[in-house]
Amino acid sequence: MSTSVVLLPGAPVLVPELSGAAAADTADQVARAVAALRSAASGCSLVVVLGSDPQGRTLCDVRASLGRWGVPIPVGRPGSPEAGDSQVPDSALLGWWFLDRAGIDLPRAFVGVPGEGSSPGDPVSDALVVVVADGPASLAARAPVPEDPRGVALDAALTDWVRRGGALPDPGAAVAESVGWWTRPVWGVLARLVGERAATRAESWAPFGVGYHCAQWDLPSPAAPTPGGPT
């Protein structure tokens, strides 16, 4: 059986209710990301979301909200147990939001990536793997980190990587931190999942000085981490 992998950005500003008029700057890209999710979910029996979490938590289906960002938008499958917002990592909340927006009603789990060298776990087949990770946050004057040519070059290299494959560009932990590439460990997990394959569809954009990337890989062999129980 095949496994689908989709890379999505994990920025709250992509949620219209949280960003107001700024949502218009990303509406088309978000719509295409949702379409990619729907396409990738065809034939899958479960969803595993991978994203940053210093605590390395693993969660099964839960409901929560985006209340930590100011608007209590509910996320999660109806009928799932409710978790306190503080119990669910940011990347899980954004992954849940994208899945809800795509109308994907498959059992879902979250596997947190705590740091460099993290392993995604044992593979399972017939899964949609959603990887929530951003590029560097130093691409323009309005970015969270002062504009840095190293960040601009890195984001261009990441754009090329998702489109062409090959070895993941990686300037090392120190440079990554200074240019705001805080999800570097998650990209490392993604690279181990997809190898040097090019994505079958890819799009990159940076309206707020942060690199956002959406890409899809259809892998011929199982590649999804086995979800465990809540921790």
Image (cartoon, rainbow, N blue to C red):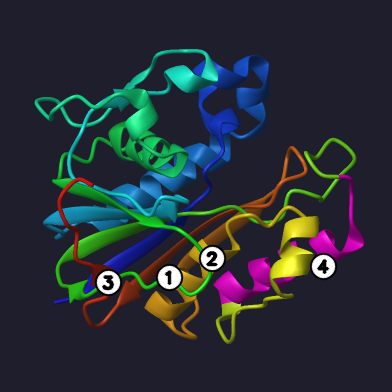
Vertical order, 58 against 117 (above or below): above
Labels in figure, total: 4
124 sits to left or right of 98: left
Mark 4 and mark 3 lie on one chain; the one further toward the N terminus is: 3
Q: Which residues are magenta?
A: 146-163
- Magenta part mainly helix, strand or loop? helix
Query: Which element is circle 4 on?
Result: helix
* Three-letter residue code for mark 4: Ala
Residue 94 image point, x, y percent:
43, 37
Q: Which residue is mark 2?
A: 185
Residue 231 image point, x, y percent:
23, 47
Residue 43 image point, x, y percent:
14, 60
Q: Which residue is mark 1?
A: 118
Q: Residue at x 53, y 21 (%)?
A: 69
64 sits to left or right of 182: left
Mark 2 and mark 1 lie on one chain; the one further toward the N terminus is: 1
Task: Kindly check if marks 2 and 1 are in contact, taking CB atoms under 8 A apart as contact.
Answer: yes
Tell me if mark 3 has few (under 14), some (14-19) or many (20+) residues whose alpha carbon lies within 10 angstroms of its own. some
Residue 16, magenta (yes or no): no
* Three-letter residue code for mark 2: Pro
The span from disc 4 to disc 3 (Cα, nearest Å) is: 31 Å
Q: Residue at x 41, y 39 (%)?
A: 89
Mark 2 and mark 4 lie on one chain; the one further toward the N terminus is: 4
Q: Which residue is mark 4?
A: 153
Q: Which residue is mark 3?
A: 121
